[in-house]
């Protein structure tokens, strides 16, 4: 196995070998182009983001600035929206479902380093994939760590650090992020805390 194959297999690897640094440089050029594209050139913006991501569904919007390592290891479904300053370290695979929203400054980190300084100083690092289900909302300033799976319909509160899997249909928040309550049918009638919708088409 070369270092790229090791990276994609979730094994310890060295990030500057076997063409990985060159691949990152090529993606940095694409990211630079995307982040500096005039905001009214919407067709170019869509073309540029599709050239970065490995797979993208319909209606994908990522507000610049956006940063990622390779881009091609990121898959997003339909109706994906990421607010400003999204960072995705995609040395491991990142899979995001349909109807997912990110607040500002959301970071997904598949990348990590060994705990022990001797091992860390060897230059080895790792990437373990992240999976986010359908209909997920991740609040601003949230960090999702390597290997985490977030279930369908979950809401992650702003400022959370997600270090373990989050099940479907729950609100979870905190550092470390923990489930605080389920999402039930009664939640449908409120747009914010105890404030009910005053319209009928929700």
Image: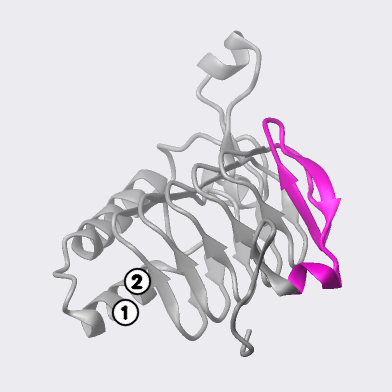
Q: Who is closer to the viewer here, 162 or 68?
A: 162
Label 2 sits on residue:
49
Locate residue 110 relative to residue 135 in the image: left or right: left
Q: Who is closer to the viewer here, 181 or 102?
A: 181
Q: Who is closer to the viewer here, 17 or 154?
A: 154
Quarter of the rendering containing residue 11: top right
Question: Tag 2's secondary structure?
Answer: helix
Label 1 sits on residue:
46
Residue 165 is inside the magenta segment: yes
Label disc, if present, on residue 133 of the rendered structure: none
Q: Quadrant of the C terminus?
A: bottom right
Asked if 114 appears above or below 100 in the picture, the reply is above
Looking at the image, can residue 1 be seen? Answer: no
At 41% across and 47% down in the image, what residue appears?
20
At 84% across and 50% down in the image, what residue appears?
181
Residue 28 is inside the magenta segment: no
Quarter of the rendering containing residue 132: bottom right
Magenta extent:
163-188
Q: Are marks 2 and 1 in contact (CB under 8 Å)?
A: yes
At 55% across and 69% down in the image, what residue appears?
75
Residue 87 position, x and y percent, is 43, 48
Residue 68 position, x and y percent, is 41, 52
């Amino acid at each position: 196995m070369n270092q790229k194959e090791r990276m994609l297999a979730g094994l310890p690897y060295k990030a500057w070998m076997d063409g990985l640094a060159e691949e990152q440089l090529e993606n940095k050029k694409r990211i630079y182009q995307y982040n500096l594209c005039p905001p009214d050139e919407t067709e170019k913006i869509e073309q540029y983001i599709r050239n970065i991501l490995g797979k993208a569904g319909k209606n994908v919007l990522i507000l610049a600035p956006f940063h990622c390592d390779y881009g091609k290891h990121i898959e997003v479904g339909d109706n994906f929206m990421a607010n400003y300053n999204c960072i995705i370290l995609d040395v491991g695979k990142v899979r995001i479902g349909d109807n997912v929203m990110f607040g500002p400054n959301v970071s997904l980190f598949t990348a990590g380093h060994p705990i022990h300084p001797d091992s860390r100083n060897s230059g080895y690092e790792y990437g373990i994939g992240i999976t986010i289900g359908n209909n997920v909302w991740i609040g601003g300033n949230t960090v999702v760590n390597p290997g985490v799976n977030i279930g369908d319909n979950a809401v992650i509160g702003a400022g959370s650090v997600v270090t373990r899997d989050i099940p479907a249909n729950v609100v979870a928040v905190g550092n470390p992020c923990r489930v605080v309550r389920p999402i039930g049918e009664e939640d449908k009638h409120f747009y914010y805390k105890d404030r009910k919708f005053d319209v009928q088409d929700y």
